[in-house]
Image (cartoon, rainbow, N blue to C red):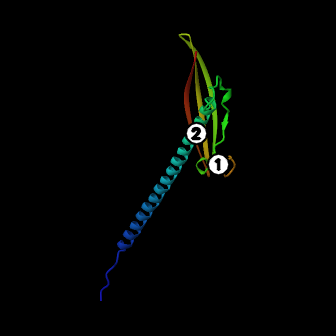
Amino acid sequence: MQRTRQTGSALVIGIFIITVMFVLTAALIRVLGDADDNVNLEVWGTRALLAANSGADAALAQLFPPGGTSATDCAAVSGRWTPPDLPGFSGCQVTLGCSKVTVNFNGETLHQFTLSSNAVCQAGQCSGGTDGDSNCLRVNRMVEVQARVDQP
């Protein structure tokens, strides 16, 4: 009886295929993880934008109170707006700013206000300590609104 010598090429091909499949699986897992991170950033960015819009609305309501008289200077606008205690606003802080320009044009006095609302929403440990950087998600959005008051 004659024995044929086996070269082991099937074993090498099998190891190669297993290695390629492992690399493809690892790449797919990484792509899915990046997609999750992008969705998180999108959600938190939208929260920050909506919080900034709400802050701008609050500043406009302070400057032009419903049923009241319009303010003549930026003192009516507070520096901060506290969002309501709702899940969509959790982790968000809003700061407000106001500047005023007065122009005399053809005998009319125009007051133009520029209101800014800056919202910072964050999740995780953003304190800057040893665990702070790896578990922190912080998003910032700013909205600017201009309003004009015509006074004779």
The residue lying furthest to the front in this view is 67
**Residue 22: quarter of image:** bottom left
Inspect the image, locate mark 2, and give the three-letter code of the amino acid beneath it.
Answer: Ser
Residue 84 position in % (x across, y down): 64, 45
Please tell me in which quadrant of the rendered image residue 55 appears.
Answer: top right
Q: Residue furthest top?
A: 106
| Residue highlighted by disc 2 | 54
Q: Position of residue 41 (x, y in %)?
A: 53, 48
Q: Tell me the quadrant of the picture where the N terminus can be found.
A: bottom left
Quarter of the image where the C terminus is located: top right
Specify the amino acid type for callout 1. Asp
Q: In the image shown, does 2 or 119 lie closer to the viewer?
A: 119
Q: Which residue is mark 1?
A: 85
Earlier in the chain: of badge 2 and badge 1, it is 2
Q: Position of residue 80 (x, y in %)?
A: 67, 36
Residue nearest the observer in this picture, 104 or 21: 104
Residue 46 vertical position relative to residue 97 in the rendered view, above or below: below
For mark 2, does the 10 Å Cα neighbourhood hold few (<14), some (14 to 19), or many (20 or more) residues? some
Query: How many residues crowd around disc 1 within 10 Å: few (fewer than 14), some, or many (20 or more)?
Result: few
* Label 1 residue SS: loop
Q: Which mark is residue 99?
A: none
Q: Position of residue 126 (x, y in %)?
A: 65, 47
Q: Residue at x 55, y 26 (%)?
A: 147
